[in-house]
Amino acid sequence: MFNTTEIMQTNEMIDSQHLDIRTITMGVSLLDCPHPDISTACENVYNKITRLAANLVKTGEEIEREFGIPIVNARISVTPISLIAAACDTDDYSPFADALDAAARETGVNFIGGFSALVHKGFTVGDKRLISSIPAALSSTERVCASVNVATTKTGINMDAVAQMGAVIKSAADMTAHAGGLACAKLVVFANAVEDNPFMAGAFHGTGEPECVINVGVSGPGVVAHALRTVKGEPFDTVAETIKKTAFRVTRMGQLVAQEASRRLGVPFGIVDLSLAPTPAVGDSVADILEEMGLSRAGVHGTTAALALLNDAVKKGGVMASSHVGGLSGAFIPVSEDAGMIAAVESGVLTLPKLEAMTCVCSVGLDMIAVPGDTDASTISAIIADEAAIGVVNNKTTAVRIIPVPGKDVGDRVEFGGLLGSAPIMPVTAGDSSAFIARGGRIPAPIGSLRN
């Protein structure tokens, strides 16, 4: 039960510290939708999603009104489409993206994830067709998100997939050049992707998930930064304990909303993802938390240690509050979506190599990074390979969401608007990785993966 003090603290966090439910995401299995005829298969997909998610947005709005808790987004994740479309005799899977986009519009959700393929050990025919369809699919739809898992700790890194994704990202950017390469903001390349992630653009409904499930993503970097102002100058033990207690309160709110949405929709409750996902709004920044610990700017020496403490304390607080914490749960560092990170990049303190180091200890990886439009595909592939290696060796989820912005160079800025924000164009390291990427094959799994 919640006591009066907890309720008052939660109200303050909502009113002045940017606490919100970032997303209620309904996961939907499409494993009963395949059909040899693509029109029939797409119709099956559309009908199932719109039937199960018909009241998702309405339910979120009702809970928001009744509980006074801001719910920013309602979203849907589905079974990786490469598995569903494989039964169809076609090379172009774009009609599935169109069906997903239509279902998203009909249900009123802002994003739908799952135009995805899992190729960490190799490709099926369906995987190859889906990956080649990504640029056209993302450039012709508004709400569809795509992801490709190219590596796991158990299998190593599929370097053929890594090479292909560099070219796919370049093509997606070129096809949406009029919008700053916006398609790339809806595409994530993963290592160790999880099946219950409610956050876009990487959400998909894993094959080990139920028929339908409700997952909730909670976010409150402003709440954590505010809490740290009360322990200014105190030892790191106190800092960690403060973050942990704050994460506990935030997770309790998320579980309340998740259970209520589950009850009203008649759908099982899956997980609460306690990820400190920032927004472009001032005061809602992970960079602010790091600077509150004593750093003059995110990116200076000490940043990785501060981020490691933050990520660990968030997870510890979350698991005390709920037995079903999942997804990614930690701290996100998307550059375009975090006002403090943007300022750190523009000051020259936060660089791409430093961001890569920080991803060793945070929730995901290189997220919403804008680079010059003339960055070649092999360089993008090499960035993906580096990030995948971090995930594989450290047995954690890592990802790359990178945008080579057509016509832009270092010193320019790209504007996406909304939660996607804006991003300064960051320089990539000079040099040529093309011969490295051209080798292909698979980087073997590390010896630490042999744990059976």
Image (cartoon, rainbow, N blue to C red):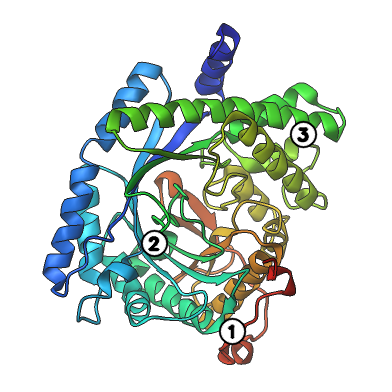
Amino acid type, callout 1: Arg
Viewer-side residue, 390 vs 224: 390
Q: Residue at x 59, y 59 (%)?
A: 397
Q: Is residue 294 above or below residue 368?
A: above
**Numbered badge on residue 442:** 1
Residue most toward the top? 4
| Quadrant in the rendering for residue 400 | bottom right
Query: Can the viewer see residue 106 in this picture?
Result: no
Q: Residue at x 46, y 75 (%)?
A: 119
Amino acid type, callout 2: Leu
Q: First in sequence: mark 1 or mark 2?
A: 2
**Numbered badge on residue 240:** 3
Q: Nearer the viewer, mark 1 or mark 3?
A: 1
| Quadrant in the rendering for residue 393 | bottom right
Disc 2 crowd, CA 10 A, few/some/many (<14, 14-19, 20+)? many
Q: Under tag 3, what secondary structure?
A: helix
Viewer-side residue, 192 vs 240: 192
Q: Nearer the viewer, mark 1 or mark 2?
A: 1
Q: Residue at x 21, y 62 (%)?
A: 33
Q: Under tag 1, what secondary structure?
A: strand
Q: Residue at x 68, y 69 (%)?
A: 449
Q: First in sequence: mark 2 or mark 3?
A: 2
